[in-house]
Image (cartoon, rainbow, N blue to C red):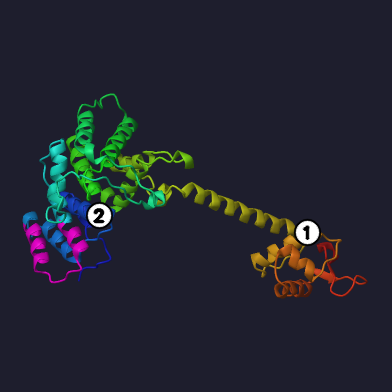
């Protein structure tokens, strides 16, 4: 029985036989790209994909079988799974073909092939403006292309790229230019839905025509990162000191094109990550200071190891406030540590038991002072 927890396509990616390797890559990428829209292909499709890779059925047969499967299904709650499966099949088919033309009709045609029968607007430029709440932007949206200018924007970006001269660029320059090109193309958002999947398929096909081997698992495993990096490349909010940047997309492309191993984490792209990072650093610094305080306190106070850090810190804070000469009582403990009567009494009792403090005579009942280590 097949282990469903094990990724069924990784073994095909590392095969040396070109046909199986290429099919494995096509299917792996096709299924991984569904994640950009929160979709997950079915186990039934995975089985068809493996049969295709192993030569038991053709890609055409796989497409027909998945179409038939959903035609005969009586389950009406499978629209998202149906989309994931059918579009995965179609992406795998397109990625297995060599035919490609770098043009707006090709770009639009890919959308039509992927989403025919899924979206009523498959292959049609949207005639309305859109916005989309983005997790990575804390709910804000990218400003997408104006519906009245989509065709012109597509033609402009593709014409500019088609005439671009890469001959003078080093690897870094190539990565930067690719990042700018693909983020600009994606930002147009020419269609109502399916823009990232269409753009990814078009981009993969384009890279192949330039001689790049992109038969890696980057899109399969990091499609959500790819989309979020496109979002960050197209969002500005100067009032919050947020600027559009392709640096995250460039990390992805370096891994894809040159086999680098840059860490790709979605949380690093979140617009509030720097704030979170600063909070984490501050917390670590505070912890470090507390630990140092505890170490310093051990010079004068013998703090038993079995005490919790919180209790140790309470004792240190209290000692810092009153020193070794000033006497204190329960009210003082409550005020200094901002705790209630019960935990204040418990702390005093514990310090007495451990001989960290001693009662003071002549000052009234319930008055104490800290004992220095040398007095023990």
Measured Cα–Cα span from mark 1 to mark 2: 59 Å
Q: In the current view of this chain or complex, which residue is farthest to the right?
A: 362
Closer to the camera in the image, 193 or 304: 193
Q: Earlier in the sequence, mark 1 or mark 2?
A: 2
Q: Can the viewer see residue 19 in this picture?
A: no
Snapshot quadrant of residue 39: bottom left
Residue depth check, mark 1 versus mark 2: number of the one nearer the observer: 1
Report the disc number at residue 32.
Answer: 2
Instruction: Report the magenta stretch's main SS.
Output: helix
Say which quadrant the C terminus sits in.
Answer: bottom right
Q: Looking at the picture, how far across and down is residue 141, in whole percent? A: 35, 47
Q: Position of residue 243 (x, y in %)?
A: 42, 38
Q: Residues within 10 Å of mark 2 (few under 14, many from 20)?
A: many
Q: Which mark is residue 144?
A: none
Vertical relation: 292 (above or below) 253: below
- Please name the residue shown 29% across and 37% down the image: 184
Q: Which residues are magenta?
A: 61-86
- Asked whether, in this view, residue 330 is left or right of residue 53, the answer is right
Number of numbered discs overlaid on the protein picture: 2
Please report the residue visible at 12 percent of the width from the left and 53 percent of the height from the top: 116
Where does the N terminus fall, quadrant-wise? bottom left
Q: Position of residue 55 (x, y in %)?
A: 9, 57
Where residue 12 appears, as percent x and y from the top left, is: 19, 55
Q: Nearer the viewer, residue 168 or 332?
A: 332
Give the answer, above or below, for where 94 lies relative to 49.
Answer: above
Q: Which residue is mark 1?
A: 321
**Residue at 41% in and 47% down:** 269
- Classify mark 2: helix, strand or loop: helix
Q: Please, what secondary structure does the residue beneath circle 1 have?
A: helix
Res. 227 in view: yes
């Amino acid at each position: 029985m097949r282990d469903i927890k094990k990724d069924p396509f990784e073994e095909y990616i590392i095969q040396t036989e070109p046909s199986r390797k290429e099919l494995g890559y096509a299917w792996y990428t096709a299924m991984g790209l569904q994640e950009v829209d929160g979709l997950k292909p079915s186990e039934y499709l995975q089985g068809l994909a493996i049969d295709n890779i192993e030569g038991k059925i053709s890609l055409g047969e796989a497409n027909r079988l998945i179409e038939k499967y959903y035609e005969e299904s009586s389950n009406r709650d499978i629209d998202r799974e149906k989309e994931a499966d059918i579009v995965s099949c179609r992406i795998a088919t397109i990625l297995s073909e060599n035919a490609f033309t770098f043009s707006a009709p090709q770009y639009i045609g890919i959308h039509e092939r992927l989403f025919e029968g899924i979206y009523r607007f498959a292959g049609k430029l949207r005639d309305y403006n859109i916005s989309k709440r983005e997790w990575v932007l804390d709910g804000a949206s990218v400003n997408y292309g104006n519906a009245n200018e989509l065709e012109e924007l597509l033609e402009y970006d593709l014409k500019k790229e088609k005439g671009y001269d890469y001959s003078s660029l080093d690897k870094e320059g190539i990565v930067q230019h690719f990042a700018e090109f693909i983020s600009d193309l994606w930002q147009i958002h020419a269609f109502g839905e399916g823009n990232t999947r269409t753009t990814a398929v078009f981009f993969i096909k384009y890279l192949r025509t330039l001689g790049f081997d992109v038969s890696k698992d980057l899109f399969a495993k990091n499609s959500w990162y790819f989309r979020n990096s496109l979002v960050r490349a197209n969002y500005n909010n100067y009032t919050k000191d947020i600027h559009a940047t392709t640096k995250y997309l460039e990390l992805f492309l370096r891994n894809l094109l040159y086999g680098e191993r840059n860490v790709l984490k979605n949380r690093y792209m979140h617009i509030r990550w720097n704030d979170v990072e600063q909070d984490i650093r501050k917390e670590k610094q505070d912890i470090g200071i507390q630990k140092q305080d505890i170490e310093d306190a051990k010079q004068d106070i013998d703090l038993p190891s079995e005490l919790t850090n919180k209790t140790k810190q309470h004792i240190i804070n209290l000692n810092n406030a009153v020193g070794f000469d000033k006497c204190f009582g329960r009210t003082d403990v409550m005020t200094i540590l901002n705790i209630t009567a019960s935990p204040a009494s418990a702390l005093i009792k514990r310090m007495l038991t451990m001989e960290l403090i001693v009662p003071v005579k002549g000052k009234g009942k319930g008055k104490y002072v800290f004992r220095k280590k040398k007095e023990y």
